[in-house]
Every structure is written in structure tokens, then in C-alpha cells.
């Protein structure tokens, strides 16, 4: 295995996507309330859950 | 009463007993070869990351820092996504028999005992506050539970924290060092830790649900009430004023998840299958997410409920259920907290004790005269003893730190000090894995620099804060120099202490590591190890390894060494296994070559660390020093061999492709050859027909001189006709051959296609009139201009017209010619009302020597070459020639010629 497998590259890309989404200045954008809950709280957990779901999708994919 | 001292002690003891049973079960299964370490167990065991800090401290942190407690869990989530980095660590560790993070760094930089010792010292000192945190949290939880119990349980000289430390030390020693495992894998421990992860998650979710839905009306209610108070409303939104801290904490926790000694132990050393990583990459972050959902609600609930009372927020998870009389829940929470603390303490102290034993005690022992005198003794018992003492000492240090500084900090504050310490490993680790030029000198300089800054800006101030040492260096700066204020170094203020320390320590660390590395030269061992680490995914392996060691070794001495450190039984097992891989039945036949030396060193490394193993092997084997240049030579050669084999592969692929092409070309040639044969056969046949007839009539003329004149004239007429046909045939064959071979001469001029068609019609008028066939045309006055060879175009039209006149019935025959200018081409149609052509025939008429009509009964009326030649010509012009026809409904031959592109 000379090159990083595709799924590893996909996961790393996900990590690179997560860094800006979970830090400032993007983190400063949500304000007020979403669904009756504080927007910042909802945003953080939603992005987090999204990353987990996507990572699961990539990692558990069959084959390559 | 449920919460009496005895019942709590009993339940705690029962829990520890269950833990022990789980570990025993895991070990028994491992010994039986049926490991229970699945991908899920591995992922759950990573949650040893969630300690009392998470269980008690996060809530406390949330009451002051709001959402910032989440950074500690977002960092690991992101770090794990970079699976390639972790996979590389695992791969290297397996190849090098790495047993700890100190071993990893030391091994990379030339199996240096100095570096191993340094990393161990940093790790122990760095992690001590973290252990203090666990002690403090468990002690606090015990105090909270016993607050209602008026009977004093403990004598005055024994505080609860010391008791907790002692119990944990005994339990860990009992649990973790029962035997010396040569692989340094503890499957029982991993199973127990995974079990603890489940317990603490369930306990925390229980208290979270209780507070959120039992005491309040769910999330919305809690947040609505919090919003009413400006004090609390601040906590529920990210605070952009602290953006720097937020990012620093994510970085810090991302590093901690792989560089904390216990995390390295679980993630790397205890990994049994690389594929497990794929599960951990999402299951562990999911675990973190779940255990954090209720942190903020519990914190808000506590603040709302105990508003105005002096209740330690770090104990909200216990005090909230207690305040509502939910004693069973409080007990469950207590067990959850105990699980969080014991899991951390067990793995951390086992990892640290291994490091202390291998990298601090061993080098000292190996030099001491006492051990020299005891040659030949089995030392595996001694190693165990050292580890046990180390566990006790580490917990004692934790207790001392708690006494010295613990009271001044909240739980999370203490933990972050440890995180900042292990972050110092990052440059040497990442540099070691991805940068071959990183040297031992650079690593030592970087670690020392970073550690010194950490000590000065974070650890010492934590002592100063509790008044244990004078705080002058924090308030006024060292020697009264304001630039040296410990938490505003060189005037850098406005940061919190963690970001400040992380910034300066990593600056010093990375700076020194890079600077010194670039200005020092690695020795031979280092260069070899650098190659093995950085190129682990494509390292050539044993062939190069064998060349990298040269010297004399004696097999019995090496075997004695193995027996000494592994114990005789284990040593024999490993020897037998090694002999089997080399195809030998008896290990006594193993030659004392480079491969055997390497095997022995690997086995020793698993027991006493790579640096000590190297020293031990060197003590019985005389290794020739290869020198840096030779080592680099061998490594370069290996790299070149790799490159050559890669090139060879490429060449082979090219060769295969070329062979394929050749084969295809050969096929084509055969096909063409066959066609040529067919063609010649047909041509010969076609030539023979007129010749036969000429010969027959000539013979008749020759043999019979008394033939009538009229008869004679008729015969001669036939002969002339056949000769003409023969000439035409030969001309056409030559013409076709020229066209096909591309040797035909073309003179391209601008031609009015309508005029050409009219001319051709005029030249054939007589022929049509003779057969009484009507010829009509529908041609524009000024025809479209095309770029063609005029004579060739005329040839095509005449050919189509003469074909048409041949096949229409005499008298009633009709031939119509149309010239239609279209958008980008001219379409010429020659339609007749002859017998027409069937579906197949429409295609076949364009084949060579294919005659229209039934050739068996009718006398051939043409050469069968006119249409193929016409098609060649039209295609040369860039157009098409085809026929549209139905049997009995006449045929329409159509050809197109493209119009020249309009000049721009």
C-alpha cells in the first residue's frame, strides 16, 4: 500500500472540513434561538453529529 | 439508610470486584486465543479519555466557561479523522515492538536512553496533576455522599483523598501487574476499561435525564429559564471574545488524545487489529457527543437550583440528585465517577510504570554493579517489582500535588496543565514520523525547551497560586523583571494561562527542534531508524535490516539474555515460534546471524524498551559500527532497488500493452491479406470471363476460314466489345488501386456542381435516347460551388447515371436527377424506377465486383467496380454515398459533398 486509501483520504478531508466549522469565526455566526434552543448549542452539536454520521458512512462503507 | 459509610464501601468494593472479573474473563479469552477485543470494544476503550474530569469537571467548567468545555471533546473528534497519522503510529509500533510513547520517541531517535528517560520524566511530572484530579474528584464525591453521615468514618490523620489514593494504588498493582506480558498487551485491562466506559456513560445519561426531565421540563424549559438571567444566558452561546482560547483548547485536546501516555497505550499499543480504527473513528466521537449532551443542562440546573448557595459546581451531578432525595441515582453516579477515575488511573499508571521501569530504572540497573554480580538470574520478577513500586510512587506524587496545588483549582484547570505537558511530545512525534532530518539532538533540545517553558509558565504558578511557593515570579516577574512574569512572558498578556503557556512552550519546542535538527548530524543508528519510521508503509524490511547489522554474536548468550528478562518459559516459546518462521524444527539450530539478533532485540524491546534492549544486546554481541555513510549507502540502495523495481513494473506494463497492439496489428494484417487474396481471385475471375469469350470467337475465326462475312463481322464486333470491357476493367482496377493506396492524383478546384451534373447528363443523352429512357433534372440555375476534383466528380455522376440507365426498363424507364443545396453540403440524388434493391443489397452493391441484378442468369452489365470507386471518390471529398431503395419501387443513389466553410 503505497498511497493512502481513499477512505482514509475522505476521513482526513472531513477533518479538514470540521476544523473551520468548529472554530471561530464561523462559530460566531449562529445567534439567537433555533428550535427554541440557543443557536450556538444547537449548531455545535449539529455539526458534531454531522461529522460523526459522515465519518461512519465513510468508514463503514464496504469495499474500498 | 442507603448512603451509610458501610453500604457505600461495600458497593464500591463490589464494583471493583466486577471490574476484576471482567478483566479476568478478557484475559482468559485472550489466552484461549479467542480475543474479546472487537472493534466496538476497542472504540469504547478509547473512552478512557473521559475521566473524572469529564464526569464531574465538565459541569463545573460549564458553570464558568459556558460551552468551552466542549473543546476538550471536539479536538479528539477532529484528530481521529486523520486516521492516516494514527495508523502510521500503530504500524511503526508493531514493527518496532514499541511499548510506550517514551519508547516510541527514543526508538525513532536512535534508541536513545537519554531521550527515553527525558520523555518519561516529562510524562510523569506532566501527568501527576491529572492523577491528582482523579483523587480530588473521587474524594470530593465521597465527601458529598458522607456529608449527611454524622459518624466520622476516618481517623483524624487519614483524609479521604489519601485513602482513595491508597485504595487505587493497591487495586492497580493487584490488577495491572500480575504478570509481565512480553507483548505489553493487556487484553483484560482493555476489556475492563471498555466496561467502565459503558458504566460511566449510563450513569451520566441517567443523571442528565433526571435533571433535564425530572427536575425541569426538558431542554427548552431549562434554556428558557437560563435566558431569563443574564448571568446564565452568557453560558449558552459561544463567546467570540475567547476565540483564541477555544482554538488552543481544541489543538491541545487533539494532541492529548494520542500523546497522553494512557491514550497512546490504548490507541496504539493495545490495538490488536488496524481495522478496528475504522470503527473507533466514529464510535468514539459518538460516545463523546452522548456524554456531553447533558453537561450544560446539568450545569444550568445546578446553578438555578442552588442559586445563592455555596455548592461546588464540580459535584452538581451528585448534589442535584441528593437534593431531591434520589439516593439510588446518587449511588449510581458515584459508581460512574468511580469508573471514570479508576479507568484513568489504571491505564495511566500502568503506562507510566512501564515507562519508569524500562526507561528510568532499567538503564540505572544495567549500569549498577549489583546487577553485574547477579548475572544469570531471572529478572522478570524484579521488573514486576519495579513496576509495582512505580505505580505506588506515581499515585503518591498525585496525592502530594493535590495537597500542594489541588485546592486552588477546579478539576478541569488541573487537567489542562497535564494536557499542555504532553503537547510537548507533538513536535518530536510528528517530526519523527514525517521528517527524516529530525535528529536526537533536536528532539532533546525541543523537549527540554518546551518542558522548561511549561514548568515555568504553568506548573510552578499552580504551586504559587496555592501559596505553596512564593508567587513573586508570577506577580512581578523573575528577579523583578516584568518581562519574565510567568503568565505574561515578554509582556504577552490578554491570554488565559493555558493558551499562553501552550503558545510559548510550543514556540520554544518547535523552534529548538527544527533549528538543532538542521544543524546536527544523525549517527548511523538514528539514520536507520528515521528511515524505518518515516517510510514504514514501504520499508523494504528484513533484507535491508539484515544488512544494517554486522558483527559477531553468540546464540547461547542471546538466549540467556532472553531467558533472563522474559522468564525461561516465555523465552522458549518465542524462540520456538521464531524458529518455525525460519523453517527450523529446533530453535537450537538457529544461526546467530543478523536476523536472530534482530529478533532477540525485538523481544527484549517488548519487555524492557528499545533503548535498554539495544544496550543489553550490545553487551553480548560485538556489533561492528557501520558508520553513518555506510548506513546511508545501504538505505539509499534499498530506496533505489525499490525505485528500480517500480520502473521494472512500469516497463513490463508497457511491454504488455505493446504486445497487445502488435497482436491486433497482426490480426489486421492477416485480414487485409485475406482480402487481397479474395480480391486477386475475383479480379482474375473477372478478367478471364472476357478473355474466354475473346479467345473462343478468335478460335472460331481462326479455325473456320469459310465463315460468312456477316458472321465474321459479328464475331469481330463481340471481340472488340469484350476487349473494350477488358480495358475498362483493367483501368478501373488500376484506378481503384490508386485510390485505395492514396496515390491517385487530385487537382482541387472550385467547381459549380450543378454545371458538372448538367454536363454529365448531356454527355449521356444519346445513351438514354437509344434506350428510350426519360432523363429529367431538377438543378438550380447557379449551382453551389464546392472544392473538388472536377473530373472525378464527373466520373461519379456519369457512373450513377449509367448504372441507372442500365437497370431501368427500356421505353418506360425514368431517371430523375436532383441537386439540393443544404446548410453545409450539397445533396445530389439520382432516382430511377428500376427493379430496386433489397435491404442487404443496398449495402452489398458497394462491395467490389458486386453486380446489380441476378448474376447467375443475367449477363453481367458492368464491371462491379463503378460504385466502390465512386464511393471512394465521394469520401475523399468528405461526403457520403449511399442508396435508398425498396424492391420494386426503384432506387435512389444519393451523394453529398460538403460546402466549403464560409470565410470568416
Image (spheres, coloured by chain):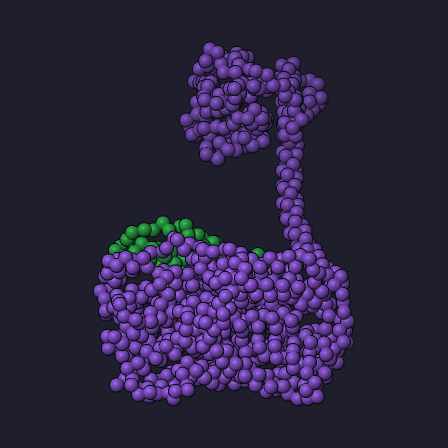
Chain colours: A green, B purple
Image coordinates of residue B235 in percent, x first then y, are 32, 59
Residue B64 falls in which quadrant of the image? bottom left
Residue under the point 41% across and 26% down: B889
Q: In which image quadrant can residue B195 be found?
A: bottom left
Q: Which of B466 and B162 is in front in this view?
A: B466
Residue B791 at x, y percent in the picture:
60, 17
Quadrant the N terminus of chain B occupies:
bottom left
B852 to the left or right of B156: right
Picture residue at 40% right of the left edge, 83% below the top: B159
Q: Position of residue B662 (x, y in %)?
A: 66, 45
Q: Nearer the viewer, residue B205 or B323?
A: B323
On screen, B606 above or below B845? below
- In this picture, is B334 found above or below B625? below
Q: Residue at point 63% right, 86% down?
A: B379
Residue drawn at the location 47% of the way across and 83% of the way down: B169
> Is A20 left or right of B423, judged from the image as shown?
left
Q: Position of residue B828 (x, y in %)?
A: 48, 21
Is residue B719 found left or right of B309 in the rendered image? right
Whether residue B870 is visible: no
Give B63 or B7, whichever is nearer the viewer: B63
Q: Going by the picture, which residue comes out furthest to the front?
A: B480
The reply to whether residue B157 is in sight is: yes
Amino acid at each position: 500500500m503505497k498511497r493512502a486509501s481513499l477512505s482514509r483520504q475522505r476521513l482526513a478531508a472531513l477533518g479538514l472540513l470540521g476544523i473551520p466549522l468548529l472554530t471561530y469565526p464561523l462559530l460566531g455566526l449562529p445567534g439567537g434561538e433555533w428550535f427554541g434552543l440557543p443557536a450556538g448549542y444547537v449548531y455545535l452539536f449539529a455539526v458534531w453529529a454531522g461529522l460523526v454520521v459522515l465519518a461512519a458512512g465513510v468508514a463503514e462503507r464496504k469495499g474500498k | 439508610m442507603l448512603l451509610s459509610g458501610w453500604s457505600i464501601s461495600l458497593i464500591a468494593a463490589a464494583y471493583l470486584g466486577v471490574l476484576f472479573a471482567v478483566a479476568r474473563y478478557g484475559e482468559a479469552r485472550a489466552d484461549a486465543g479467542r480475543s474479546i477485543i472487537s472493534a466496538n470494544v476497542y472504540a469504547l476503550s478509547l473512552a478512557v479519555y473521559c475521566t473524572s474530569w469529564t464526569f464531574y469537571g465538565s459541569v463545573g467548567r460549564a458553570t464558568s466557561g459556558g460551552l468551552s468545555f466542549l473543546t476538550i471533546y471536539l479536538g479528539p473528534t477532529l484528530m481521529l479523522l486523520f486516521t492516516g497519522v494514527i495508523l502510521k503510529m500503530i504500524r511503526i509500533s508493531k514493527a518496532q515492538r514499541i511499548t510506550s510513547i517514551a519508547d516510541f520517541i527514543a526508538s525513532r531517535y536512535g534508541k536513545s536512553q537519554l531521550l527515553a528517560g527525558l520523555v518519561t520524566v516529562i510524562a510523569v511530572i506532566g501527568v501527576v496533576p491529572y492523577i491528582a484530579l482523579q483523587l480530588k474528584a473521587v474524594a470530593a464525591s465521597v465527601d458529598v455522599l458522607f456529608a449527611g453521615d454524622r459518624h466520622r468514618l476516618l481517623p483524624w490523620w487519614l483524609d479521604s483523598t489519601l485513602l482513595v489514593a491508597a485504595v487505587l494504588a493497591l487495586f492497580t498493582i493487584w490488577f495491572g501487574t500480575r504478570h509481565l506480558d512480553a507483548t505489553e498487551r493487556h487484553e483484560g485491562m482493555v476489556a475492563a476499561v471498555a466496561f467502565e466506559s459503558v458504566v460511566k456513560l449510563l450513569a451520566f445519561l441517567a443523571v442528565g435525564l433526571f435533571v433535564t426531565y425530572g427536575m425541569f421540563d426538558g431542554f427548552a424549559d431549562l434554556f428558557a429559564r437560563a435566558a431569563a438571567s443574564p448571568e446564565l444566558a452568557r453560558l449558552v452561546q459561544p463567546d467570540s471574545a475567547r476565540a483564541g482560547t477555544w482554538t488552543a483548547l481544541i489543538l491541545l485536546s487533539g494532541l492529548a488524545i494520542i500523546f497522553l501516555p494512557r491514550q497512546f497505550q490504548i490507541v496504539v499499543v493495545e490495538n490488536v487489529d488496524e481495522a478496528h480504527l475504522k470503527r473507533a473513528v466514529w464510535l468514539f466521537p459518538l460516545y463523546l457527543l452522548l456524554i456531553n449532551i447533558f453537561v450544560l443542562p446539568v450545569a444550568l440546573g445546578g446553578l438555578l437550583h442552588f442559586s445563592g448557595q455555596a455548592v461546588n459546581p464540580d459535584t452538581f451531578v451528585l448534589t442535584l440528585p441528593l437534593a431531591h432525595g434520589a439516593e439510588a441515582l446518587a449511588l449510581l453516579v458515584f459508581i460512574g465517577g468511580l469508573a471514570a477515575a479508576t479507568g484513568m488511573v489504571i491505564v495511566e499508571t500502568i503506562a507510566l510504570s512501564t515507562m519508569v521501569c524500562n526507561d528510568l530504572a532499567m538503564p540505572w540497573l544495567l549500569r549498577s554493579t549489583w546487577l553485574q554480580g547477579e548475572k544469570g538470574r531471572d529478572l522478570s520478577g524484579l521488573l514486576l517489582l519495579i513496576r509495582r513500586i512505580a505505580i505506588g510512587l506515581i499515585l503518591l506524587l498525585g496525592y502530594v500535588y493535590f495537597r500542594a496545588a489541588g485546592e486552588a483549582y477546579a478539576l478541569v484547570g488541573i487537567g489542562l496543565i497535564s494536557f499542555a505537558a504532553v503537547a510537548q511530545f507533538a513536535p518530536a512525534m510528528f517530526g519523527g514520523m514525517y521528517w527524516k532530518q529530525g535528529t536526537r539532538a533536536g528532539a532533546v533540545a525541543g523537549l527540554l525547551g518546551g518542558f522548561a517553558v511549561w514548568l515555568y509558565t504553568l506548573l510552578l504558578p499552580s504551586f504559587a497560586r496555592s501559596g505553596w511557593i512564593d508567587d513573586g515570579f508570577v506577580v512581578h516577574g523573575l528577579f523583578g523583571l516584568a518581562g519574565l512574569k510567568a503568565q505574561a512572558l515578554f509582556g504577552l498578556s490578554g491570554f488565559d494561562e493555558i493558551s499562553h503557556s501552550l503558545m510559548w512552550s510550543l514556540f520554544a519546542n518547535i523552534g529548538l527542534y527544527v533549528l538543532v535538527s538542521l544543524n546536527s548530524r544523525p549517527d548511523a543508528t538514528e539514520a536507520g531508524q528515521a528511515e524505518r519510521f518515516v517510510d514504514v508503509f514501504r520499508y523494504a524490511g528484513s533484507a535491508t535490516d539484515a544488512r544494517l547489522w554486522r558483527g559477531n554474536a553468540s546464540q547461547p548468550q542471546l538466549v540467556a539474555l532472553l531467558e533472563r528478562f522474559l522468564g525461561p518459559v516465555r523465552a522458549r516459546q518465542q524462540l520456538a515460534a521464531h524458529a518455525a518462521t525460519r523453517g527450523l524444527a529446533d530453535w537450537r539450530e538457529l544461526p546467530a546471524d543478523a536476523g536472530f539478533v534482530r529478533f532477540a532485540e525485538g523481544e527484549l524491546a517488548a519487555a524492557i524498551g528499545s533503548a535498554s534492549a539495544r544496550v543489553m544486546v550490545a553487551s553480548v554481541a560485538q556489533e561492528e559500527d557501520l558508520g553513518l555513510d555506510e548506513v546511508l549507502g545501504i538505505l539509499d540502495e534499498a530506496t533505489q532497488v525499490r525505485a528500480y523495481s517500480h520502473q521494472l513494473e512500469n516497463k513490463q506494463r508497457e511491454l504488455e500493452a505493446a504486445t497487445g497492439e502488435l497482436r491486433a496489428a497482426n490480426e489486421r494484417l492477416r485480414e487485409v491479406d485475406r482480402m487481397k487474396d479474395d480480391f486477386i481471385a475475383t479480379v482474375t475471375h473477372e478478367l478471364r470471363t472476357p478473355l474466354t469469350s475473346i479467345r473462343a470467337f478468335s478460335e472460331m475465326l481462326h479455325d473456320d476460314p469459310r465463315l460468312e462475312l456477316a458472321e465474321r463481322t459479328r464475331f469481330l464486333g463481340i471481340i472488340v466489345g469484350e476487349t473494350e470491357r477488358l480495358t475498362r476493367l483493367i483501368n478501373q482496377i488500376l484506378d481503384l488501386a490508386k485510390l485505395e493506396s492514396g496515390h491517385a492524383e487530385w487537382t482541387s478546384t472550385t467547381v459549380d456542381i450543378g454545371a458538372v451534373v448538367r454536363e454529365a447528363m448531356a454527355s449521356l443523352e444519346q445513351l438514354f435516347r437509344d434506350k428510350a429512357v426519360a432523363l429529367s433534372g431538377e438543378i438550380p440555375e447557379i449551382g453551389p460551388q464546392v472544392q473538388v476534383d472536377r473530373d472525378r466528380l464527373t466520373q461519379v455522376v456519369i457512373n450513377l447515371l449509367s448504372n441507372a440507365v442500365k437497370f431501368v426498363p427500356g421505353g418506360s424507364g425514368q431517371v430523375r436527377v436532383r441537386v439540393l443545396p443544404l446548410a453545409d453540403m450539397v445533396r445530389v440524388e439520382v432516382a430511377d424506377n428500376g427493379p430496386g434493391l433489397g435491404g442487404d443489397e443496398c449495402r452489398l452493391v458497394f462491395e467490389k465486383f458486386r453486380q446489380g441484378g441476378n448474376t447467375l442468369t443475367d449477363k453481367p452489365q458492368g464491371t462491379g467496380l463503378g460504385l466502390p470507386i465512386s464511393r471512394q471518390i465521394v469520401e475523399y471529398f468528405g461526403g457520403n454515398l449511399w442508396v435508398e431503395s425498396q424492391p420494386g419501387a426503384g432506387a435512389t443513389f444519393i451523394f453529398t459533398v460538403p460546402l466549403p466553410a464560409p470565410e470568416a
